[in-house]
Amino acid sequence: MRWRLAFLGALLIPELALDPFRGGLTATLRHPFGTDDLGRDALLRLALAAAHSLGFASGCALLALSLGLLLAWQGQRFLGLWSALRSLPPLLFLLPMAAAMGGLPALPLGLLLGGLIAPHLEPALRVRINHFRHSPAWAVERTLGAPWPSTLRRWAPWGWQQTAAIFPSAWLAALWGEATLSTLGLGPGPGHDSLGRLLAEELPRIGSDPSPLGWAALGTVLLLAWSSVPRATA
């Protein structure tokens, strides 16, 4: 979880400067992957786009976890509604909305993704919270009338451990949601570079005019997908 949260800082990194007169350069020692059509170093752009995507996913995952905890703690009377929302993947809501609006900027997309992922996290969080609520430790806290700041301070490490186990699922859902919309041209515009935007630009060219940037972007996405597959433990 910690290495994913570290990418939140990448959202503050400014975009690379444009230099169209140096666009389309082939690979050299100075530019190992050449430059893209707007003169940006392809290797630096790939690194920055990947960092932006990972940071965006981390922000969405934090929002989804916060909303999921709120639903699990206070949303018992609306369990039927959360079950209905969980029956459909978030992209099924986002795709028609993004198509109707001609694309979604980064901030609205992040808020929507976080809100749509939260109901999917609610069952696992509710199981953990109910286990805590029915424990003798929680009964003692209520009996003694401990103030909530004291309770929060004592139980925050336990809560962090519980949510950290679910964070990767929310992170992956946000990462692939943003990448899918951007690849289809329905995600954030040119001001927000990402792996999905790179793929949208480079995938159509791989068959006819392949570039190192296109293959590198595709390889990065495949590596992320492979690294996300759960590993069997002995």
Image (cartoon, grey):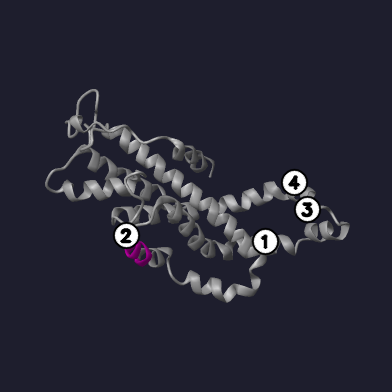
- Residue located beneath label 1 in the image: 129
Q: Disc 1 residue type?
A: Ile
At mark 1, the secondary structure is helix
**Res. 88 in view:** yes
**In terms of secondary structure, where does tag 3 sit?**
helix
Q: CA distance from mark 3 to mark 4?
A: 8 Å
The residue to which callout 3 is attached is 148
Label whose residue precedes the other's in the sequence (1 or 4): 1
- Which of the two residues, 222 or 11, is positioned nearer the viewer here? 11
Give me the C-alpha separation between circle 3 and circle 1.
16 Å
Q: The disc labelled 3 sits on which kind of residue?
A: Trp
Of callouts 2 and 3, the N-terminal one = 2
Residue sitting farthest toward the right: 144
Cα separation, mark 1 vs mark 2, equals: 40 Å
* Cα–Cα gap, marks 1 and 4: 16 Å
Element carrying mark 2: loop
- Point out which mark residue 153 bears: 4
Of marks 3 and 1, the one in the foreground: 3
Q: Residue at x 79, y 48 (%)?
A: 150
Which residue is found at the position 17% from the left and 34% from the top?
24
The answer to whether 126 appears left or right of 48 in the picture is: right
Q: Amino acid at mark 4?
A: Arg
> Is the residue marked by circle 2 packed among few (<14), some (14-19), or many (20+) residues within 10 Å?
few
Label 1 packing within 10 angstroms: few (<14), some (14-19), many (20+): some
Q: Residue furthest bottom?
A: 80
Which comes before the other along the chain, label 1 or label 2? Answer: 2
Provide the residue designation for mark 2.
102
